[in-house]
Image: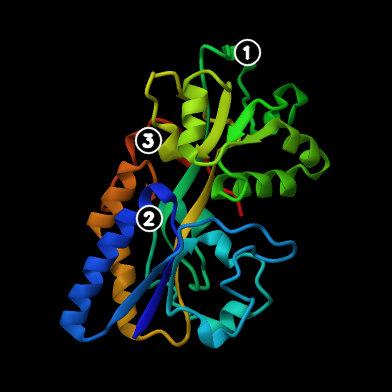
């Protein structure tokens, strides 16, 4: 039996798990490989000095899943040579479109993006005028935003990613930035709070930011780029070669089109960029990690 570990954003995780489960049954009938899909639904607390996930680099490598379908931050902060010792290098096996390759590709071929997820700042235009809007990510460090920017639960991917970016790029202002943030649980709570005017601005992944019951949300496009995290695939050294076909499936039109509908960036040339992204500068996509 092979084991696939999966941790994806809440709004796409169930659909992806269902699609992957159906494909797994087809593959079992075709080639005899039985695959168990283990899906992590909860965001894990950060751990000082670790990658904050507890699945990689913190236990017996023999227990590693055969395949990972996760946020790229699962693979940050690992010991030197950990990937080389425990994962399969497949350079060129899963090529990504030219517009993404330099920023999001792994030339050593250990991790393979199958989509890129942007994070969006969004605001309520009845609460903020044009002059008040932040133009750069550094603008949200200003004390004038104290308790005015809402995000999901502090262990959710969006706050963790934004905190990581701010801490790495503006360490002297990091503590002040934390005073500007209010955590509100589920991403939909953040959207509703901005939509209703409870808070002037919020930050989530871009698919949630598109939702607005009262049409009171506008997405900001910072001049220094839309912050993104790739969603990636990786195979441990014990993985059966037949599991590479699951990588092909994650890049198939049915999956890539679904991701594009969420305003996530497809990695294959066959599927066009989402309209929301195409309307702005595709070159401004910026990797957080």
Number of the front mark, 2 or 3: 2
- The reply to whether residue 11 is in sight is yes
Residue 27 drawn at (x, y percent): 21, 77
Q: Mark 1 Cα within 10 Å, few/some/many (few <14, many 20+)?
A: few
**How far apart are the alpha carbons under marks 2 and 1?**
38 Å
Q: Is residue 24 above or below residue 226?
A: below
Q: In which quadrant of the rendered image does the C terminus lie?
A: bottom right
Q: Earlier in the sequence, mark 2 or mark 3?
A: 2
Residue on which disc 1 sits: 131
Residue 127 drawn at (x, y percent): 56, 14
Label 3: state its secondary structure.
helix
For this rendering, which residue is in front, 48 or 196?
196
Q: Mark 2 Cα within 10 Å, few/some/many (few <14, many 20+)?
A: some
Describe residue 256's horizontal placement relative to residue 135 as left or right: left
Q: Earlier in the sequence, mark 1 or mark 3?
A: 1
Q: How many marks?
A: 3
> Which of the labelled discs sits on residue 13, or is there none?
2
Q: Residue at x 43, y 37 (%)?
A: 208
Residue on which disc 3 sits: 278
């Amino acid at each position: 039996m092979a084991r696939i570990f999966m941790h994806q954003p809440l709004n796409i995780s169930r659909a992806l798990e269902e699609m992957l489960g159906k494909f797994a049954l087809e593959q079992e009938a075709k080639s005899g490989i039985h695959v168990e899909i283990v899906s992590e639904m909860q965001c894990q607390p950060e751990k000082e000095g670790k990658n904050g996930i507890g699945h990689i680099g913190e236990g017996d490598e023999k227990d590693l899943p055969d395949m990972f379908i996760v946020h790229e931050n699962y693979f940050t902060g690992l010991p030197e040579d950990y990937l080389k010792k425990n994962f399969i290098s497949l350079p060129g096996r899963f090529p990504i479109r030219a517009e993404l390759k330099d920023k999001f590709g792994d030339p050593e071929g250990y991790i393979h993006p199958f989509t890129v997820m942007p994070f969006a700042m969004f605001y309520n235009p009845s609460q903020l005028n044009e002059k008040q809007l932040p133009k750069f990510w550094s603008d949200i460090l200003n004390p004038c935003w104290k308790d005015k920017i809402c995000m999901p639960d502090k262990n959710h991917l969006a706050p963790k990613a934004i905190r990581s970016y701010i801490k790495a790029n503006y360490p002297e202002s990091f503590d002040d930035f934390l005073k500007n943030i209010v955590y509100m649980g589920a991403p939909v709570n953040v959207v509703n709070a901005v939509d209703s005017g409870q808070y002037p601005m919020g930050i989530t992944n871009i698919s949630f930011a598109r939702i607005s019951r009262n049409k009171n949300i506008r997405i900001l496009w910072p001049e220094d780029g839309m912050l993104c995290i790739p969603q990636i695939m990786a195979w441990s050294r014990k993985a059966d070669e037949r599991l590479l076909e699951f990588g092909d499936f994650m890049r198939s039109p049915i999956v890539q089109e679904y991701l594009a509908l969420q305003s996530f960036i497809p990695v294959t040339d066959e599927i066009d960029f989402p309209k929301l992204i195409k309307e702005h500068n595709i070159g401004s996509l910026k990797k957080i990690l």
